[in-house]
Image (cartoon, grey):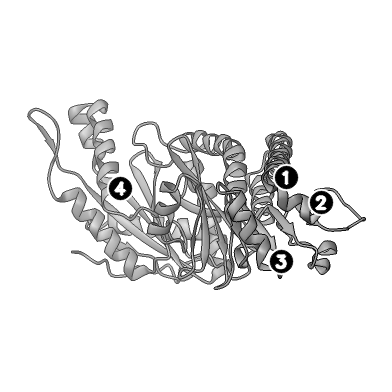
């Protein structure tokens, strides 16, 4: 619509004369003229002289209008109709210059904001600033920014002022994959879906999808081409800042990994379990932890050497990871002991997971070298929040006690903690 000239007149001769004398131009006399950057106001449109359409940047006013303001050309009607093309070309150039100046001003503003964002160290603070700026450009009040968390291996809320949003634990909460793909493939990194009731804006840094902004919309909400372009330019400018935060988060993630098995390490376990307890307490949900200790790994070290023992630990970690969900966290707790943190999982479901891991470990021998095959089993102990404890130390102690009850009896089985810390019959499968 930036190339369309809006015509406001109650007389039919104006529009027909303009179309005849300016064949290369597009003129609108219907509702589309409300979006035009250049408009012609006939002398009979006096109410619009003081209250012109909001989108107009340059107004050609025909007749005697003495109170000229910025962006207005006041011309005698007959003089204009005698040679309208020159006036319209000038008005169009003036509108283009105004748009270009506004874009440059916005770019300067983006650079200033980037400088300010780079001085911020907290991802939530940066996320709030970016989200509120996007909402301001769009003209909407509520939105949520999700950032990828390498520790959790899913997208989590970094900032939200949307009171209708609720944490679900999904990989990318509440965003249809096809809508996200449409936004990514659009080249503008923005997609609107009325059926889904949202605008989606992916944040891509190099080849990584580091985040997504989600803005709820109503059935009549609209965004025009100019707004879409403004949002795209802004997100292109600031995504690099979020990318730097993402890279820093990934670096921290590497520091949270065990060098040998690539499972999470004890440092991660301590902080993540605190977060999971707080999340479960806040939302009234449950989660479970499984402790497992390898049976007789010392015999493998003594017979084959510690190098083979290390390779056995690597294979164990692979098999555990293959038997759990993406949101479950596998931790090398120490030595030959592992822990699995299972969000939104009760004791019965944790039992199924433990037996699935047990089956994965014993399904076939570990073929570590030609002629070297090792069979390894583990003893498992389960504790569930809040059934078996509401503090980190209590949950760890209960799961550990359940595991050692198994290890002291049958081995290669699964035990569940009890509130009374009494021995529960061990479930074999």
Q: Nearer the viewer, mark 3 or mark 4?
A: 3
Instruction: In the rendered view, tell whether residue 203 sits above or below residue 116.
Output: below
Relative image position of residue 182 (x, y in whole percent) = 41, 53
Relative image position of residue 297 (x, y in whole percent) = 25, 39
Few, some or many residues within 10 Å of mark 1 (<14, 14–19, 20+): some
Nearest the viewer among 120 and 186 is: 186
Q: CA distance from mark 2 to mark 3?
A: 15 Å
Figure quadrant of the C terminus: bottom left
Helix or strand or loop: what does disc 2 sit on? strand
Q: Is residue 123 left or right of residue 54?
A: left
Sequence-first tag of 1 and 4: 1
Residue at 46% x, 68% y: name it. 196
Q: CA distance from mark 4 to mark 2?
A: 77 Å
Q: CA distance from mark 3 to mark 1?
A: 17 Å
Q: Are marks 2 and 3 in contact (CB under 8 Å)?
A: no
Q: Are marks 3 and 4 in contact (CB under 8 Å)?
A: no
Residue at which label 2 appears? 75
């Amino acid at each position: 619509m930036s190339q369309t000239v809006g015509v406001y007149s109650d007389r039919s001769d104006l529009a027909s004369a303009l179309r005849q004398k300016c064949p290369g131009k597009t003129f609108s006399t219907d509702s589309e003229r409300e979006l035009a950057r250049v408009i012609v106001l006939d002398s009979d449109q006096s109410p619009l002289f003081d209250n012109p359409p909001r989108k107009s940047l340059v107004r050609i006013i025909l007749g005697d209008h003495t109170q000229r303001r910025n962006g207005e050309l006041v011309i005698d009607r007959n003089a204009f109709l005698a040679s309208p093309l020159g006036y319209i070309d000038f008005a169009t150039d003036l509108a283009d210059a105004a748009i270009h100046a506004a874009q440059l001003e916005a770019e300067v503003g983006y650079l200033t904001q980037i400088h300010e964002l780079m001085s911020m160290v907290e991802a939530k603070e940066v996320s709030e600033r970016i989200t509120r700026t996007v909402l301001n450009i769009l003209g909407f009040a509520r939105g949520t920014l999700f950032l990828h968390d390498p520790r959790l291996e899913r997208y989590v809320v970094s900032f939200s002022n949307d009171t209708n949003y609720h944490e679900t634990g999904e990989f990318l909460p509440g965003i249809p994959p096809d809508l996200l793909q449409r936004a990514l493939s659009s080249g503008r990194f923005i997609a609107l879906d009325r059926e889904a009731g949202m605008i989606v804006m992916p944040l891509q840094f190099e080849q990584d999808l580091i985040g997504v902004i989600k803005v709820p919309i109503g059935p009549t909400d609209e965004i025009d081409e100019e707004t879409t372009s403004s949002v795209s330019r802004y997100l292109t400018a600031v995504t690099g800042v979020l990318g730097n935060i993402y890279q820093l988060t990934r670096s921290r993630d590497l520091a949270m990994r065990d060098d040998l098995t690539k499972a999470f390490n004890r440092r991660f376990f301590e902080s993540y379990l605190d977060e999971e307890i707080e999340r479960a307490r806040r939302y009234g949900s449950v989660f479970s932890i499984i402790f497992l200790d390898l049976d007789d790994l010392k015999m493998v070290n003594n017979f084959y050497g510690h190098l083979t023992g290390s390779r056995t630990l690597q294979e164990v970690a692979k098999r555990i990871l293959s038997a759990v969900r993406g949101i479950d966290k596998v931790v090398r707790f120490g030595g030959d002991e592992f822990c699995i943190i299972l969000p939104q999982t009760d004791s019965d479901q944790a039992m199924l997971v433990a037996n699935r891991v047990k089956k994965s470990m014993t399904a076939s021998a570990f073929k570590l070298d030609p002629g070297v095959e090792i069979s390894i089993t583990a003893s498992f102990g389960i504790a569930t929040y809040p059934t078996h404890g509401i503090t980190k130390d209590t949950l760890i102690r209960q799961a550990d006690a359940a595991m050692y009850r198994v290890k002291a009896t049958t081995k290669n089985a699964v035990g569940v903690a009890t509130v009374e810390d009494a021995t529960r019959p061990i479930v074999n499968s």
